[in-house]
Image (tube, rainbow, N blue to C red):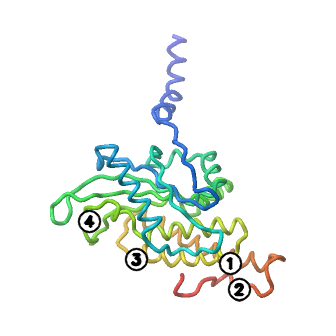
Amino acid sequence: MRTKTIRWLLLPALLALLPALGRAALVDCQPAAGRFTVFLSEPSGPLFTQPAQLRQFMQQLQFELDQNRDARWVLSPGTDVRFVACPGRAPALDGQDFGRDIVDALHTRRVLLEVWGLLSSGPGADGRPQPQAQMNFLLVPLQQAANEQGASAAAGASALQRLRYPEAGAAPTSDPVLLIARPTDIDAFVASAFGLKLLRERSFELAHRNLCRAGHLLGAIARRPLAGRSRDDLARLREQVRAAAGQAVAQAKADANYPKLGLLRLREPAQPCDAEEG
């Protein structure tokens, strides 16, 4: 009888361990040396049936984002941002792999953003199969700050943002790279994470410019037909980004080492961005 009782007492703990036991450790990925980095991790889902197809997709996605366009976040000499494909690194869709230790390591290595998701296929408006995606964007500096703040961060924006493609009314495409590589979306999240990271590093002017740019780009996303949690999470992120832009102004003015003729001395924390930026 006692043995049965012990078994029943242990059962909840064993069940709680099953997801972790069945999940492989998150494969490490090397960031771009000496640069800020965005990790492009492997998507899950049934869209690619052969490993070679998945590898080709990731190579094409990296090229499209890293080489084949003009980014809209704000750079200065020494602050390059590069995209790195991470074969074999496939985080869980709910983000449960990103515990404190992993986020600390990403933050220390200047990884700004990790992108992954679920790729599948469904009928398009014309009835033909079209790629579909749920994409996740983890803003590493925001998650790092939430980890440090603990319970007090509960009311802040979620570091894990989610978007679904294609959206209602979007032009159909059979190319999953073009489906995902949306410049406004990627650049909005990169600029947000970049600005938050630079603010922590007390690079006030570049942080301010990126945070204001992020607010503008996030506003453009918010005008699209988003739904449910994605819309609400995006709105909270935009509010937090604008607040951080105000913090950049306030902290710069309070910093004895900030130049007396610095541009942020002309700004006010309550209205840190120009109308066209925010």
Q: Secondary structure at mark 2?
A: helix
Type of amino acid under label 2: Leu
Pointer 3 or 1: first along the chain? 1
- Residue 101 x/y as whole percent: 63, 45
Mark 2 and mark 3 in contact? Answer it, CB < 8 Å.
Answer: no
**Residue neighbourhood size for the residue with mark 1, other residues' Cα within 10 Å, grouped as few (<14), some (14–19), many (≥20):** many
- Residue 105 x/y as whole percent: 64, 49
Type of amino acid under label 1: Glu
On screen, residue 227 versus residue 123, left or right, reads right
Marks 3/1: CA–CA distance? 28 Å
Q: Secondary structure at mark 4?
A: loop
Q: Which mark, residue 223?
A: 3
Type of amino acid under label 3: Arg
- Residue in the image at 32% along x and 49% along y: 53
Mark 2 and mark 4 in contact? Answer it, CB < 8 Å.
Answer: no
- Residue in the image at 53% along x and 23% along y: 10
Marks 4/1: CA–CA distance? 39 Å
